[in-house]
Image: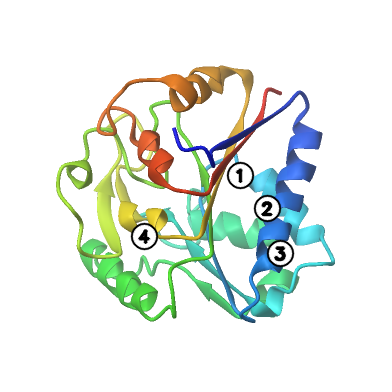
């Protein structure tokens, strides 16, 4: 585990939400180029923090381009679309102020959607400044699941198609490639709930392979912080 790995525990969800949002805000304000690129994960865990961010008056939204880390391959207005949930959570006031809002275009064919998104990611002037992630109980992050082919072979593209396990609601997924996350300047991991203690323990001192527990790949990053609410 790298020395820069930071694990911060909170007893309450409210305190976790407030401090995690303040930390992301600090990272945004540390970028001194006038343009900030930030990728946000879907899933239920991060949204309380996103709501907190949307309420702050100190973020330069007009300097920020938001990206998705991953998406379910469904129409953008679907109830299970990450894009729809991001829009609802951040609100139109924030969305309209953004420098850019780069979402997967799921009206395209599955593979074409990944290719089109990868092309837009290539236009970024540098690697992403901030990536915000959750981690599933199986260790997946973004839509990068255990035993996926991306852990055995280097992925050339910046965005890929991926398949979730059959028990999940939508199996067809779109995701940024692992290397794009590892090339970013900062990775922020949001974990919520006592049931995720095993996830935290595996990150901190486990010995599973990356293929078995993908989140262990994030320990290769020099600046990764984990924010865990036990509530």
Give 4 or 143, whichever is nearer the viewer. Answer: 4
Separation of marks 3 and 2 at Cα, in angstroms: 10 Å
Question: In the rendered structure, are the residues bearing label 2 and label 1 in contact, judged by CB atoms less than 8 Å apart?
Answer: yes
The residue indicated by pointer 1 is: 46
* Image quarter of residue 218: top left
The disc label shown at residue 91, or none: 3
* Mark 3 Cα shell of 10 Å, populated few (<14), some (14-19), many (≥20): some
| 148 relative position to 59: left or right | left
Question: In the rendered structure, are the residues bearing label 4 and label 3 in contact, judged by CB atoms less than 8 Å apart?
Answer: no
> Closer to us: mark 4 or mark 3?
4
Give 113 or 41, whichever is nearer the viewer. Answer: 41
| 105 relative position to 160: left or right | right
Separation of marks 2 and 1 at Cα, in angstroms: 6 Å
> Closer to us: mark 4 or mark 2?
4
The residue indicated by pointer 2 is: 50
Residue 9 in view (yes/no): yes
> Closer to us: mark 1 or mark 4?
4
* Mark 1 Cα shell of 10 Å, populated few (<14), some (14-19), many (≥20): many
The disc label shown at residue 32, or none: none
Q: Position of residue 179 (x, y in %)?
A: 32, 56
Separation of marks 1 and 4 at Cα, in angstroms: 20 Å
Q: Residue at x 81, y 59 (%)?
A: 55
Q: Residue at x 43, y 47 (%)?
A: 221
Question: In the rendered structure, are the residues bearing label 1 and label 4 in contact, judged by CB atoms less than 8 Å apart?
Answer: no
Q: Position of residue 12 (x, y in %)?
A: 78, 27
Q: Residue at x 41, y 61 (%)?
A: 75
Q: Position of residue 61 (x, y in %)?
A: 70, 73
Mark closest to the chain's N terminus, 4 or 3: 3
Q: Position of residue 146 (x, y in %)?
A: 28, 33
Position above or below: 96 against 88: below
Separation of marks 4 and 3 at Cα, in angstroms: 27 Å
């Amino acid at each position: 585990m790298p020395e820069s790995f930071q694990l911060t525990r909170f007893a309450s969800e409210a305190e976790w939400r407030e401090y995690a949002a303040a930390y992301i805000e600090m990272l945004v304000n540390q970028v001194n180029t006038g343009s900030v690129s930030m990728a946000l994960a879907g899933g239920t865990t991060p949204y309380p923090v996103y709501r907190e961010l949307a309420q702050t008056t100190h973020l330069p939204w007009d300097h920020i381009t938001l990206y998705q880390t991953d998406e379910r391959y469904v129409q953008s207005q679907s109830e299970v679309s990450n894009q729809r949930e991001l829009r609802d959570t951040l609100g139109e006031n924030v969305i309209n102020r953004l420098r850019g809002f780069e979402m997967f275009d799921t009206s395209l064919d599955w593979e074409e959607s990944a290719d089109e998104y990868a092309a837009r990611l290539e236009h970024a002037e540098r690697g992403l400044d901030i990536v915000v992630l959750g981690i599933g109980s199986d260790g997946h992050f973004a839509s990068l699941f255990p035993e996926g082919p991306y852990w055995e072979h280097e992925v050339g593209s910046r965005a890929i198609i991926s398949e979730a396990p059959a028990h999940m609601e939508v199996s067809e997924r779109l995701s940024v490639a692992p290397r794009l996350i590892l090339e970013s300047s900062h990775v922020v991991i949001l974990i919520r709930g006592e049931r995720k203690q095993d996830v935290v323990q595996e990150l901190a001192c486990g010995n599973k392979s990356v293929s078995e527990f993908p989140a262990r790949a994030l320990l290769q990053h020099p600046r990764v912080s984990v924010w865990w609410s036990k509530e």
